[in-house]
Image: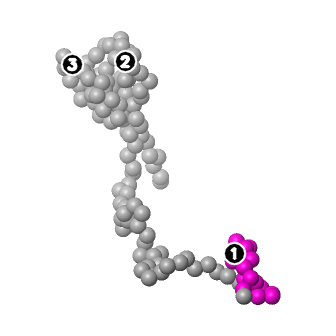
Amino acid sequence: MIEANEPTEGTVVKQVTPAKITTTQIIEDLENGIDRTGIQTKYGLESWEVKQMFMHPTLKGKKAKKVRKLSFEFVDDTLPLNSGDIAVEQAEPINSNQTSIPVETTETFHGTVENDTNTQFTQF
């Protein structure tokens, strides 16, 4: 049987109402998945106090993030590459004496040479 992955709610430990609650504390609680009801319980507040707090411009419209826990252990087993690196099997050897970029050319009738941009050059 396959069990559904259900979102978990942030844990709330009831405290005595502190003398000072900061917007940073509330934002941190929201990031940890604690919603307004949880904040009310955690800080021992009345519902009107929570409503008043969320009228502050910093908290206005903020909601608790959904904290989801995987039902299995997910392990990254790939080798880390630095940004901009090319994997070894994709890298081409570098010729430090190279002075030009090779362009594939094809010779056509009457001694003219075309490159892949269809520009024609006449050989003398």
Query: What residue is shown with label 1?
Result: 116
Query: What residue is shown with label 3?
Result: 20
Question: Residue 123's x, y, as percent?
Answer: 72, 86
Please name the amino acid that badge 2 sits on.
His
Which residue is drawn at the image coordinates 44% and 46% (left, top)?
5
Q: Nearer the viewer, mark 2 or mark 3?
A: 2
Which residue is drawn at the image coordinates 37% and 18% (left, top)?
56
Question: Residue 102's x, y, as percent?
Answer: 58, 79
Q: Residue furthest front?
A: 124
Whether residue 112 is visible here, answered yes or no, is yes
User: Which type of secondary structure does the marked residue at label 2 adopt?
Assistant: loop
Q: Which mark is residue 17?
A: none
Inter-mark Cα distance, 1 to 2: 63 Å
Nearest the viewer among 99 and 5 is 99
Query: What residue is shown with label 2?
Result: 56
Please name the amino acid that badge 3 sits on.
Lys
